[in-house]
Amino acid sequence: MHTPTRDYTIPEGCPACGADLPVRVSAAGPSGVCKHCGWMGRPLITVTHGGLRVHSASAQA
């Protein structure tokens, strides 16, 4: 079964600079690259009663 890939833009969704964040969601999960500052990552997207919550996991050493 083929799962479609979807592209979204999350307004002010970049965790680094606050710019709009283009996100691609596929079977592998979401991934985003900020066109403004170059931040790359796999944002965590949670469905809430008020809509979507987008956040990124903090780095661990």
Image: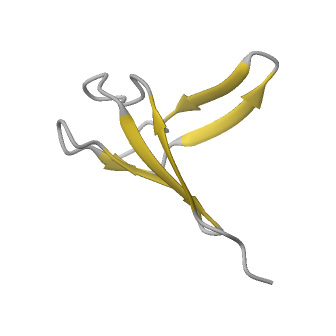
Q: Point out residue 43 in the picture as x, y percentages from the top left corner.
A: 50, 43
Can you give x and y, in whole percent of width and height, for residue 19 in the image? Answer: 29, 26
Q: Is residue 39 above or below residue 19?
A: below
56 vs 38, left or right, is right
Residue 27 drawn at (x, y percent)? 66, 69
Quadrant assignment for the N terminus = bottom right
Quarter residue 38 falls in:
top left
**In this figure, which colouring scheme has been used for the structure?**
secondary structure
Residue most toward the bottom?
Answer: 1
Q: Residue at x 17, y 37 (%)?
A: 37
Residue sitting at the far top: 50
Eyeballing the image, is 40 above or below 19? below
Q: Is residue 16 left or right of residue 60?
A: left
Give the total of numbered labels: 0
Residue 22 location (% of width, % of height): 40, 44
- In the shown orientation, is residue 5 left or right of residue 2? left
Q: Residue at x 35, y 30 (%)?
A: 20
Nearest the viewer among 57 and 38 is 38
Q: Residue at the spot x=56%, y=31% of the render?
A: 54
Find the residue positioned furthest to the left. Answer: 37
- Tell me where residue 47 sits by quadrant: top right
Whether residue 55 is situated above or below residue 34 in the rendered picture: above
